[in-house]
Image (cartoon, grey):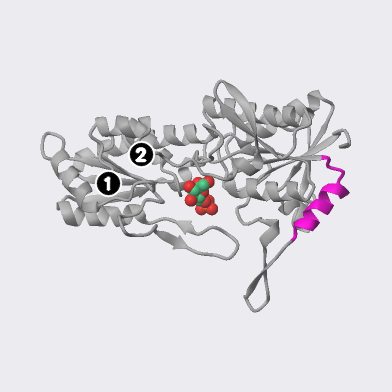
């Protein structure tokens, strides 16, 4: 029989997404309503594993007053990291060499030491996999899905995605004007490592001529031919939206850098596509990388509502004895999916989904 909950610990892991602070606000308020205390863990699990790095000891006691003014803010009050996997903690020797150490027992011990009865883990597939592993070692955990890429299989939506698409669309509106003035091709690179949802939705909303996504390897010649046709008449300019994880037929993703203990950094595909299109079409082409601009900024109303809903859902789950589950949106309901299932599969763009069909009907080219 589990001890009744008196105190919970919340952490945010992986890339930030607008809506994280709304989750924190919601967890603190819903927990306070039940008489529970909430403690925030700094930067994933680093606040527990490396308390010495933080002037406040790596933990922040959270109450209703402290989180009062945060739900509308981007970023995360707790900080986050995407190199904080305690099962594969990277240690650097003075000679510059690195080795991986399993520090998961220290995390569990720290939860016990600080009398944290249960954990709300807010993260994408990487952070939720860590949460699942901690759960398997005995920690009481509820996960909250987070990724602007919107690629978690078990939930139809994650917060941050809608804000990212709105902002990217605004950027494209601006880019149309300058592209038109110079009769150029403008290639806009957006985030989307494995899944092209941001590129797809932004490309349709922003009236792009072509959208290149990881799910559909592209043939640059097909894209060039399409752009030549599309810029032959009154309209002389074109917008191409490229997800950072897009790849040519028979080719690989464009990696910017690799580092021990973290997923490879992508970037550069926009520049490459722009150069190739300039060569093939003879039209002047430029690349713009929206990158982290899509992650910063305030959550729009939809993402705020999602974050608030997921936070309240996580506390509801713990209060109803659930453990090892992730809150998921399955409209009109919030559901609770075993973490094991939730991290199994990414939600990639099916090339027969409605958005792709709409794009094709609008004569948008995928280069496939
Ligand atoms: O959260 C996922 C993501 O936005 C990916 O689309 C992107 O590859 C990655 O984060 C970038 O992370 P970082 O901020 O570490 O460069």
Residue at 41% in and 43% down? 196
Given residues 105 and 44, the one toward you in this image is 105
Residue placed under numbered mark 1 in the picture: 368
Q: Left of 204 or right of it: where is 88? A: right
Q: Secondary structure at mark 2?
A: loop
Q: Quadrant of the N terminus?
A: top right
| Residue 12 visible | yes
Query: Over which residues does the magenta segment extend?
Result: 103-117
Q: Secondary structure at mark 1?
A: loop
| Residue 43 visible | no
Residue 175 is situated, as x and y percent measured from the top left of the image, at 30, 39
Residue placed under numbered mark 2 in the picture: 351
What is the residue that sits farthest to the left in this orientation?
233
- Asked if the residue at label 2 sits under 8 Å from ligand 1, the reply is no
What is the residue that sits farthest to the top in this orientation?
332
Residue 66 tag number:
none
Residue at 80% in and 47% down? 138
Are the residues at dot 1 and dot 2 in contact (C-beta closer than 8 Å)?
yes
Q: Is residue 278 magenta?
A: no
Residue at 35% in and 39% down? 351
Residue 248 is situated, as x and y percent measured from the top left of the image, at 31, 55
Residue at 27% in and 37% down? 176
Residue 73 is situated, as x and y percent measured from the top left of the image, at 59, 34
């Amino acid at each position: 029989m589990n001890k009744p909950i008196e105190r919970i610990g919340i952490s945010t892991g992986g890339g930030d997404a607008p809506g994280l602070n709304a989750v924190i606000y919601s967890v603190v308020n819903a927990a306070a309503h039940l008489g529970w205390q909430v403690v925030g863990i700094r930067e994933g699990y680093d606040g527990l594993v490396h308390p010495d790095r933080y002037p406040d000891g790596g933990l922040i006691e959270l109450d209703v007053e402290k989180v009062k003014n945060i739900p509308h803010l981007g970023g995360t009050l707790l900080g986050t990291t995407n190199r904080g996997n305690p099962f594969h903690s990277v240690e650097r020797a003075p000679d510059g060499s690195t080795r991986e150490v399993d520090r998961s027992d220290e995390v569990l011990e720290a939860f016990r030491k600080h009398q944290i009865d249960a954990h709300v883990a807010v993260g994408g597939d990487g952070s939720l996999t860590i949460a699942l592993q901690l759960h398997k070692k005995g920690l009481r955990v509820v996960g909250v899905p987070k990724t602007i890429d919107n690629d978690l299989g078990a939930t139809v939506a994650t917060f941050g995605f809608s804000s990212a698409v709105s902002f990217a669309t605004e950027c494209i509106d601006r880019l149309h004007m300058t592209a038109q003035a110079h009769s150029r091709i403008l290639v806009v690179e957006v985030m989307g490592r494995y899944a092209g949802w941001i590129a797809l939705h932004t490309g349709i909303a922003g009236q792009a001529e072509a959208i290149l996504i990881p799910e559909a390897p592209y043939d640059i010649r097909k894209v060039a031919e399409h752009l030549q046709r599309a810029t032959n008449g009154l309209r002389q300019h074109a917008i191409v939206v490229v997800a950072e994880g897009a790849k040519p037929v028979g080719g690989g993703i464009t990696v910017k850098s690799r580092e021990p203990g973290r997923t490879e950094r992508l970037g550069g595909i926009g520049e490459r596509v722009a150069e190739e299109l300039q060569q093939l079409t003879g039209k002047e082409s430029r690349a713009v990388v929206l990158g982290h601009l899509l992650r910063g900024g305030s959550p729009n109303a939809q993402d705020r509502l999602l974050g608030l809903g997921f936070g309240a859902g996580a506390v509801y789950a713990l209060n109803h004895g659930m453990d090892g589950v992730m809150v998921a949106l399955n409209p009109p309901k919030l559901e609770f999916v075993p973490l094991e299932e939730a991290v199994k599969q990414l939600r990639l763009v099916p090339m027969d989904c409605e958005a792709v069909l709409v794009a094709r009907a609008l004569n948008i080219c995928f280069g496939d």
